[in-house]
Amino acid sequence: MATDRTVMPRAASEIRTFDVETDVLVVGYGCAGAAAAFEAASSGAQVLLLERASAGGGSSALAGGEIYLGGGTPIQRACGFDDDAEEMAKFLLAALGPDADREKVTLYAEQSVRHFEWLVERGVPFKPSLWDSPTWVPPTDDGLMWMGENSWPFTEIAKPAPRGHRPTSNDFGGWLLMKQLTAAVAAVGVDVLCDTYATNLVEGSGGDVLGVVARRYGMEYTVRARRAVVLTTGGFVDNEEMLALHAPQLVGHNKNSDGSDDGRGILMAQAVGAAVKHMSAGQIGISLVPGLIARGMIVNGQGQRFITEDTYPGLVGQAALYRQNMDVWVIIDEQGYEAVPEPERWGVRPYHVAGTPEELAALIGVPPAGLRATIDVYNEHAARGQDPLFHKSDRWLRPLVPPFAAIDVKMGLRPPSESGSGRGSGASVFTIGGLHTTVDGEVLNLDGRPVPGLFAAGRATSGLHSWGYISGTSLGDGTFFGRRAGAAAASM
Amino acid sequence: MATDRTVMPRAASEIRTFDVETDVLVVGYGCAGAAAAFEAASSGAQVLLLERASAGGGSSALAGGEIYLGGGTPIQRACGFDDDAEEMAKFLLAALGPDADREKVTLYAEQSVRHFEWLVERGVPFKPSLWDSPTWVPPTDDGLMWMGENSWPFTEIAKPAPRGHRPTSNDFGGWLLMKQLTAAVAAVGVDVLCDTYATNLVEGSGGDVLGVVARRYGMEYTVRARRAVVLTTGGFVDNEEMLALHAPQLVGHNKNSDGSDDGRGILMAQAVGAAVKHMSAGQIGISLVPGLIARGMIVNGQGQRFITEDTYPGLVGQAALYRQNMDVWVIIDEQGYEAVPEPERWGVRPYHVAGTPEELAALIGVPPAGLRATIDVYNEHAARGQDPLFHKSDRWLRPLVPPFAAIDVKMGLRPPSESGSGRGSGASVFTIGGLHTTVDGEVLNLDGRPVPGLFAAGRATSGLHSWGYISGTSLGDGTFFGRRAGAAAASM
């Protein structure tokens, strides 16, 4: 495990006096913890928020900042899009499946406009303008972006509307979300204790959770929670042993985290009987420029296309890792490459260029006959604005012309001369699975019943998702179900 | 959960007198339980074996019967194959990965010849003759078959040798393995108690496992194990809730089990702190005739080939489900279809026939341009004995000629008129993940330390595998690590 100390619970009977008492104890100060603490304090409870780092923010503050919201938000309407909760739920069930959590998705979609308003009330700004092409994170401060809703096969499943809402910040915006939530948490009088790493739950004789044991400046620190504990400790991408046990395909990649997503909250809850869900799932931040594959193609080790290139790039990443073992190449021509402004190429350069598909294939170790057939079929139909295999939008369809270039995703998104890292895995990943919870954040045990006194939200839990992933659903379900967990914990 | 009764442990202090006491208690009478009980009793321990059904056998008795063995067994040598443990381990690490259990695989390969001898000593017969083409289960009683070792990419990873060892039985042979193991168990004086369903572990005050609580003819029945409990209760494919939580892609398929693989053993162990591993993995028995795809091809919803067709068909099934969502078709011509003897076609018939790839594609809803390009590339190279995309053996390569036929794997392996079931999911599945154990069958807890008094083997555990699966590794690691668990439990 991540530490040589046990994750097993401490019996309450062994603790003579607690160092501190509170009504609701929230463990972990990312977006889910902030939302939980805010709601619990707003409903009148005394709230203590523990954070292992020296300040709040967590992986949320390092995130792109997209929050998946829809159903007809003011930003959507201002940008000219109709949307409703039903279409939003249809898209999420398809994109996050198979077997996405229908109850959570339905509730999340139905209350999405209200959740948008809650964020605005907390001071999170959204600009009513649309970034209208595939990318990971726009360089602008546009407040809305597509997350694959306008790509096949989703276009056949739900009425497309862009739902990626962005706090008003150029590039990454997670910091701004957390800045505003931190101010909100302070305003409602939550006590925040940083540099305090919760290691074990405290269990009563009836199996109820009564608090936590933490480490603080090398000393043991005990907290009694009179009403409930809310775990918002993040995922487990930084725990190599948990990854190997549950998500072996995520081993060996860069980690998309603040370095402290060690799964400790999940483990300490399992140690009191909590069940987990979908622990093998992961978000795959593949190292490619979405605007380039939209204008070209991505092929596998046989030179075959394998996904609609203009979809949400995380779905490209999942397909590349889980279906193609990251044996993938971006194929582009000069016009396509130049169409993406240099600053938006993130240092990506074509390392292999050739005059024919066969020559290019030979350079990158792909079967020449495979790449030739792929480009021939693509070009023949692109000339007519068609993509019979993957139905890419005709906006991006154009026959590729020689010379052809191949880009190795394993070279990463910065020039190797700058990063010094050379060829990597081609992806940054984080985990999606976690504790099995109800829509109110109750942590369910192996019998499917709530563990008394224990709640959770954010990436310590399995949220809306089972397998698929769309950006904005972590900050989205973390804040949404964090709020619900905080309110439920306060009402105990 | 599978039952409305809790899986949580019973405190030993609550049980006044146990209904029966034994040294070693083995729970579940499949191949792993039989092997564990035999070894424990052989080393002098008093052994009780509980089985929920009215007789032993379990899913093992319904299995094809292949046992994955190698490293130079007498059967391999008699058939003219050199093999050694190192090449066997290389193949298994590649076929069962990523991140197959290196320690288990290495030990399993090193001691494989000895394990073969142990099976022969128990009366399991193996005939020194080879079945030499891809299939699920040969119709003959040949004692040896390939399990993909001679297919790409494994041919580039390890020296090929066939390692599927088959008890001497036409078609399925799991019954014969269990018949002989059952006789061996009886011969060493193991007490067998059938119609007894273990529901909970009994836990001492120090967290050690002291026995089980069972249900027997509607009454509670308690067993005290003086040395240890060995769980050999099988996987969880029959538990819909566990499938949805851990392996959502396995939901909705036929189940390859005796109907009682409800995961209870896994859950009752988790309830005392046991860790699990690779719970999302599954074997996918795809409903196709391997001899037909070897002579033709299997394509996805884009009309693309996606795997070497002459490999072990379970790997075809995993690729079809996990990578193609079971949106796959078998493509064959008349000569290829007729080359498989009628009895070996298991009722499979081509429902769609057309004179051109485009016409066939239109019939089955696949992009005509995709299927056309696939067949053109395949035929052009097959004429020269080459398969640049997937390196199928030239033994099976021949240009396909019109008329072309498409076979829907969702029609299953029996004529619909006989089964009455019509179109199904196209697969029968079982789970591969389970309890996290050492090579001696000790069950590890969330801290990575053995749960005192608790052992496990077979499909209740994560065995050699992480993700991939090869037939013969369940009866193989079930008996091999079952023996080790039984011996270790007896030595407590």
Image (cartoon, coloured by chain):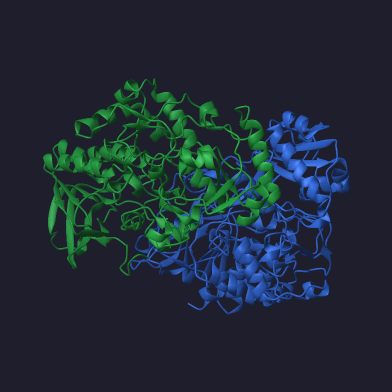
Chain colours: A blue, B green
Foreground pick, A203 / B355 = B355
Q: Quadrant of residue A74?
A: bottom right
**Which quadrant is the C terminus of chain B positioned in?**
top left
Give percent across and percent down for residue A46.
55, 74
Is B67 situated left or right of B337 in this image?
left
Give percent across and percent down for residue A254.
64, 43
Q: Is residue B182 visible?
A: yes
Q: Up-down: is A478 above or below B212?
A: below
Foreground pick, A471 / A392 = A392
Q: Quadrant of residue A97?
A: bottom right
Residue in the picture at 64% in, 63% down: A473
Is B155 situated left or right of B130 in this image?
right
Is B137 situated left or right of B178 in this image?
right
Q: Up-down: is B480 above or below B407?
A: above
What is the count of numbered marks? 0
Residue in the picture at 68% in, 77% down: A114
Foreground pick, A244 / A401 = A401
Foreground pick, B113 / A266 = B113
Residue in the picture at 61% in, 63% down: A94
Q: Is residue A413 visible?
A: no
**Which quadrant is the N terminus of chain B positioned in?**
bottom left
Give percent across and percent down for residue B386.
61, 29
Q: Up-down: is A400 above or below B102?
A: below
Residue in the picture at 34% in, 68% down: A206
Give percent across and percent down for residue B450.
33, 45
